Amino acid sequence: MTDTDGGAPPKHHEASATEKRVILASSLGTVFEWYDFYLYGLLATIISAQFFSGVNETTGFIFALAAFAAGFAVRPFGALVFGRLGDLVGRKYTFLVTMGLMGFATFTVGLLPAYASIGVAAPIMLVALRLLQGLALGGEYGGAATYVAEHAPNHRRGLYTSFIQTTATLGLFAALLVVIGTRTMIGEEAFKAWGWRVPFLISAVLLGVSLWIRMQLQESPVFQKMKEEGSNSKAPISEAFGNWENGKWALIALLGAVAGQAVVWYTGQFYALFFLEKMLMVDGATTNILIAVALAIGTPFFIIFGWLSDRIGRKKIILAGCALAAATYFPAFHLLSEAANPALAKAQATAPVSVIVNSDDCSVQFDPIGKNTFDAKSCDIAKSFLAKGAISYTNVEAQAGSIAQVKIGGETFTAPDPAKLTGDDRKAAINAFQTALKAALAKAGYPSAADPEAINTPVVIAILTYLVLLVTMVYGPIAALLVELFPTRIRYTAMSLPYHIGNGWFGGFLPTTAFAMVAATGDIYYGLWYPIGVCVLTVVVGLVFLPETFRRNIDQ
């Protein structure tokens, strides 16, 4: 860890032409990589239908999110592979390799045959390409952040690296614009059939531009000086994590900063998107536009909080963002429901749904192999219908062996007993039960989809913008903090691993975990306990163990 105090910052420092070029080139290249990576997240619902159509709808969507998360799962391994390469060979050439891999994988997704064409081979190939993307991204971020930080003066490192922090959001924003533009030009039906491939194929053009931009850069002066002096690490992985002195800072960085930053990031920019589309039944095009507007409003605050961290410190801003998230997620998402689908919110309040059954008689509404038709138990018949319709419900415990009942407001409906029915009789009884539930839900005011005319757009955008502002608080200063925790000789490796474990595992698995929690409990808000719990952990560990780093000199 670097201990040297950089002293009081000079009063004036204008960024040189070289520094501006470094920031611009590094940031633009990283924007395009994030564009590639997040296209999949934006199109998760469509990809679920294209590649996971062999299982029930709820499982298919969770599978699609799991494939999204697969790219995050391997990011720590990419961090080790490319972090080591970056500390041995150099920052510049390493992120040229990662960019090429990312571009190839994304372009190929646009060419993949769907499940209807080649069966189970389609999702297997999709997951393989997501893994390749994750490996590439695991090496990209650490290189870009380290490269910019090593060009920055000590007293402006938070400001300079905050431009790198905007790239994930700008990449998401660029992907949103391409998706919205394509949807608008060809129509929703054509987009779902084949147009979803266009944004992936366009990435070939972005790859060419990105590689050309990165080729113009020179190696980091700090790394070059270390290389000339022969003081660079010969074994960066073992030096970074093989001894407790360095390894403990990676653990503190992970639990005391990055884990909380990651779940806030993915809650504010991805879980909110999925929640709007899947739980509140806002159509995909409208959801994309609402998120895009919030991102456009909130993105400048990455720079503001990066700049502020140069003056008051990184730690307090990051931990304050985590604390605010933990305290406000539940009221924020309840307000989001009321504004985005007021009919649904009113129905949930005036005619709440409950399932009365013994919990031992129920299956979790998630089927990894696609074989469970959820019609072997009365509880499954009831809950699978509610889960498919994104109906939030509470569980009421009943005596063992009881037949499941669904209560909607003041009406109660008893599910068929599959033990007493077979063949066509079972199918007819299930259909009759579902028809009765559908009519009762409609009578109670439960909508089949959000009414675009009823959406309170200013309030929805305000809530989404607030969630993005929390993201900017935790994410704006994080690169500078991580760079300052580790010495130059192992910096790329040492900062990349905790960053990508946090963002790859704690954050990347958030949508999958949260929606699985929702499917298991029936409560559409229950998944929020996951990010809230991680944020509380980060605040506690960060307050006790995380040092303040914002005046450190990293040129060693």
Image: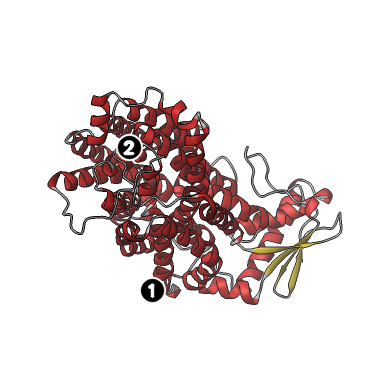
Which one is nearer the viewer's eye here, 117 or 467?
A: 467
Q: Position of residue 28 (x, y in %)?
A: 24, 45
Image quadrant in which you'd find residue 26: top left
As drawn, 316 above or below 75: below
Name the residue furthest left: 17
Which mark is drawn over residue 143? 2
Q: Disc 2 to disc 1, how far (Cα)?
A: 39 Å
Residue at (54, 62) in percent of width and height: 326
Q: Is residue 180 visible?
A: yes
Q: Is residue 473 left or right of residue 61?
A: left
Which mark is drawn over residue 270? none
For the N terminus, the image quarter is: top left
Amino acid type, residue under disc 2 in the picture: Gly
Q: Is residue 163 left or right of residue 440?
A: left
Which one is nearer the viewer's eye here, 389 or 214?
A: 214
Which one is nearer the viewer's eye here, 66 or 49?
A: 66
Q: Is residue 238 left or right of residue 444?
A: left
Q: Indicate the colouring scheme.
A: secondary structure
Which one is nearer the viewer's eye here, 41 or 226?
A: 226
Residue at (24, 48) in percent of width and height: 153
Q: Position of residue 195 (x, y in %)?
A: 34, 46
Residue on which disc 1 sits: 458
